[in-house]
Image (cartoon, rainbow, N blue to C red):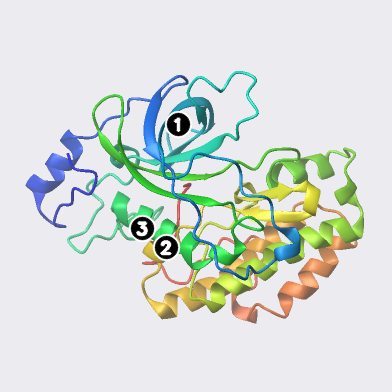
């Protein structure tokens, strides 16, 4: 099956062909892929020059074999599998920069089951969104990173392009390559756990924590001004660059999920609410009160909610785990 194989909604034979090609075979450490990383196409003036990370020393524009070393996201319930990888033969005690590979595998994504309408909408209450073809997901994410190129290396990871690959079991798939953001606490999700458990961290202090929040908010607002939504705002998708007291947003998927401009605008307000919720989960004061105050000025009253579970419309393409 081609990586961009498609069927017509309502075509039972096409649906069966999709299902027949589905595979749940897992990736594993030691699997190798040969790809040519693309050097990030950065503008001459970046959004946050004082907070830029140096571009990792990688063999751009040269076909290189990489070995998967550690899973970062795998298993049932995810649209993608994410792995840390290193140049083959160098991953043992090597100073060479590792790379993050995000695999979008058709058989791991949406399955056209009986709840899929002839218009491509899942009709069950749990989903209530459009079926998303894998390559549309890939194109949307790649377009988001390229549109926000001036944030790469600061509040976005460096993006090394989209690559078509073949899984070990023969299934064609897509792979996106990114900068690896190392260190602790890792993500806002993990930082919130440290804070709620009473652990020691500089982010218990007001100024460092608010610098994290403002870096997240500024980037999200800039994206919205460019008609880009994140589409999966949650603490696990907000990494922490502790050396610079800023966040690093990952898993941008919006361009394929919200083609309707009105839906993008409505979803933008929901994303501010979701961002608020992601940060106030820390439970620390006075930071949480200040974040609520800031977000209240951004969010219309009818979309402001503490649980942040709302969506612009029941038929919108709300994102599941990436």
> Can you give x and y, in whole percent of width and height, for residue 78 in the image?
44, 41
Quarter of the rendering containing residue 95 = top right
Residue 151 versus residue 299 in the image, above or below: above
SS at mark 3 in the image: helix
Instruction: Say which of 164 and 302 sits in front.
Output: 164
Tell me what residue is drawn at x 55 percent, y 74 percent. 224
Find disc 3 in the rendering and name its residue: 139
**According to the image, label 2 marks what residue?**
143
Tell me where residue 174 appears, x and y as whole percent: 34, 43
* Alpha carbon separation for disc pair 2 and 3: 6 Å
Residue drawn at x 54%, y 66% as measured from the top left: 148
State whether residue 59 is above or below residue 120.
Answer: above
Left or right: 214, with 60 as reference point: right
Q: Is residue 201 visible?
A: yes
Above or below 16: residue 302: below
Mark 2 or mark 1, which is nearer to you?
A: 2
Q: Quadrant of residue 246?
A: bottom right
Camera-nearest residue between 37 and 162: 37
Give percent across and percent down for residue 245.
79, 54
Cα distance in 3D space between marks 2 and 1: 26 Å
Ranked by sequence position, the earlier of labels 1 and 3 is: 1
Residue 132 in sight? no
Residues at marks 2 and 3 touching, judged by CB atoms closer than 8 Å: yes
| Mark 1 or mark 3, whichever is nearer to me | 3
Q: Residue furthest left?
A: 13
According to the picture, the residue beneath numbered tag 1 turns out to be 75
- Quick one: label 3, few (<14), some, or many (20+) residues within 10 Å? some
Instruction: Report the number of numbered marks.
Output: 3
At mark 1, the secondary structure is loop
Above or below residue 272? Residue 239 is above
Mark 2 neighbour density, 10 Å: few (under 14) some (14–19) many (20 or more): some
Q: Secondary structure at mark 2?
A: helix
């Amino acid at each position: 099956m081609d990586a961009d194989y498609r069927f017509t909604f309502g075509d039972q034979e096409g649906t069966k062909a999709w299902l027949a090609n589905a595979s749940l075979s897992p990736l594993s450490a030691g699997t190798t892929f040969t790809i040519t990383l693309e050097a990030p196409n950065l503008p001459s003036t970046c959004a946050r020059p004082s907070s830029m990370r140096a571009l990792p020393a990688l063999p751009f524009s040269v076909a290189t074999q990489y070995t998967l070393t550690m899973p970062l996201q795998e298993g049932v319930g995810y649209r993608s599998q994410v792995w840390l990888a290193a140049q083959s033969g160098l991953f043992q005690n090597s100073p060479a920069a590792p790379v993050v590979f995000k695999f979008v595998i058709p058989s791991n994504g949406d399955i056209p089951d009986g709840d899929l309408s002839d218009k491509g909408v899942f009709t069950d209450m749990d989903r209530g969104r459009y079926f998303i073809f894998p390559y549309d997901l890939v194109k949307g994410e790649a377009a988001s990173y390229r549109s926000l190129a001036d944030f790469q290396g600061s509040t976005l990871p460096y993006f090394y392009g989209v690559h078509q690959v073949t899984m070990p079991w023969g299934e064609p798939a897509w792979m996106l390559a990114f900068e690896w953001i190392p260190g602790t606490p890792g993500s806002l999700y993990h930082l919130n756990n440290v804070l709620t458990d009473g652990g020691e961290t500089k982010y218990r202090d007001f100024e460092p924590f608010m610098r994290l929040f403002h870096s997240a908010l500024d980037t999200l607002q800039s994206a919205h001004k460019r008609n880009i939504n994140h589409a999966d705002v949650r603490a696990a998708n907000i990494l922490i660059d502790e050396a610079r007291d800023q966040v690093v947003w990952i898993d941008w998927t919006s361009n394929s999920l919200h083609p309707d401009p009105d839906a993008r605008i409505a979803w933008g307000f929901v994303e501010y609410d979701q961002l608020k919720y992601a940060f106030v989960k820390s439970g620390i004061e006075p930071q949480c009160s200040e974040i609520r105050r800031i977000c209240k000025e951004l969010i219309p009253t009818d979309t402001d909610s503490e649980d942040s579970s709302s969506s612009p419309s029941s038929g919108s393409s709300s994102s599941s785990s990436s």
